[in-house]
Image (spheres, grey):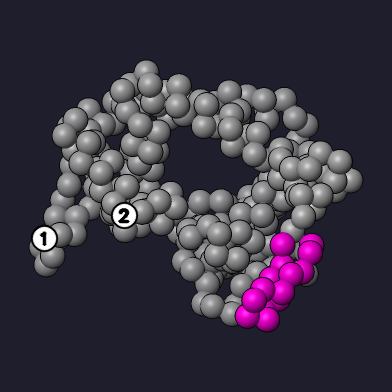
């Protein structure tokens, strides 16, 4: 990292190209950098599969993601405000997608009795049929993972849950519903414990998207 002083006398820090995650020489010497690049490759694979499915059905990737999310989550989460946070996009982007889905007859909007501008989104029969055709688009990635031995898979999953939780705590991911941020979760020495289920959890039982998730009060997060 290089420091410069601007005309106002303030110090400004810049990372040189040699410090970049994407600098191949530096990357080979840092495991975290290689993992970041690996995650980028996986993200690209996910997007390729999603785009392929989207083109087949004449929908956009975000429209497919919205339909799948609505199909499998409780209705309280299926409104424009939450969906925008869920997918890290603007409310306008979600609203535009919802308009198209509504026009295609794939969703049903149920307006609030107290605020006509607010509505919950559910799937129509036609929308459910689309989800049945699309919700397996990421199966090729799952198939590759199923060839990994269980011990390595459990370790990978444990790392991913910690990564997602950390990204949420740092403000990069707006929404997460993993055990680590839930008020029912407790870390007892090296063990995980759920007070709702009243049971010890193995690493592979930690949930990434828990329907009973209840956000832990600020300042009482998992270590």
Compared to 145, does 2 lie above or below? below
- Does residue 41 show up magenta in the picture? no
Which callout, 1 or 2, points at the residue further toward the start of the chain? 2
Q: Which residues are magenta?
A: 1-14
Report the mark closest to the observer, 1 or 2: 2
Describe the element under mark 1 as helix, strand or loop.
Answer: loop
Mark drawn on residue 186: none
- Where is residue 3 drawn, in percent x and y? 77, 69
Going by the image, does 194 lie left or right of 89?
Answer: right
- Is 158 or 8 nearer to us in this picture? 8
Say which residue appears at 68% left-offset and 81% top-offset.
Answer: 9
Residue 132 visible at all? yes
- Is 204 or 116 nearer to us in this picture? 116
Say which residue appears at 74% left-offset and 58% top-offset.
Answer: 15
Say which residue appears at 78% left-offset and 43% top-offset.
Answer: 23
Residue 74 visible at all? no
Question: Marks 1 and 2, how far apart in space?
Answer: 17 Å
- Where is residue 113 drawn, in percent x and y? 10, 63
Say which residue appears at 69% left-offset and 71% top-offset.
Answer: 12
Describe the element under mark 2 as helix, strand or loop.
Answer: helix
10 Å neighbourhood of mark 2: few (<14), some, or many (≥20)? Answer: some
- Does residue 4 show up magenta in the picture? yes
Where, by quadrant of the figure, is residue 16 drawn? bottom right
10 Å neighbourhood of mark 1: few (<14), some, or many (≥20)? Answer: few
Mark drawn on residue 116: 1
Compared to 112, does 78 lie above or below? above
Quarter that holds the N terminus: bottom right
Going by the image, does 78 lie left or right of 28?
Answer: left
Find disc 2 in the rendering and name its residue: 91
- Where is residue 148 drawn, in percent x and y? 75, 30
- Where is residue 147 drawn, in percent x and y? 72, 25
């Amino acid at each position: 990292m290089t420091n410069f002083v601007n005309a106002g006398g303030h110090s400004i820090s810049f990372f040189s190209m040699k410090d970049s995650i994407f600098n191949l020489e530096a990357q080979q010497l840092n495991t975290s950098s290689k993992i970041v690049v690996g995650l980028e490759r996986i993200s690209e694979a996910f997007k390729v599969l999603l785009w392929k499915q989207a083109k087949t059905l004449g929908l956009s990737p975000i429209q497919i993601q919205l339909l799948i999310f609505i199909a499998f989550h409780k209705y309280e989460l299926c409104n424009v405000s939450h969906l925008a946070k869920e997918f890290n996009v603007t409310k306008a982007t979600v609203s535009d997608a919802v308009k198209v889905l509504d026009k295609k007859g794939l969703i049903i909007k149920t307006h609030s009795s107290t605020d006509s501008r607010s509505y919950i989104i559910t799937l129509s029969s036609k929308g459910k049929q689309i989800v049945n055709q699309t919700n397996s688009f990421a199966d090729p990635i799952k198939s590759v993972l199923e060839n990994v031995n269980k011990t390595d898979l459990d370790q990978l999953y444990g790392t991913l849950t910690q990564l997602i939780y950390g990204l949420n705590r740092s403000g990069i991911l707006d929404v997460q519903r993993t055990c680590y941020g839930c008020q029912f979760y407790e870390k007892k020495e090296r063990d995980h414990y759920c007070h709702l289920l009243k049971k010890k959890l193995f690493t592979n039982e930690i949930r990434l998207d828990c329907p009973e998730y209840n956000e832990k009060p600020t300042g009482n997060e998992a270590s």
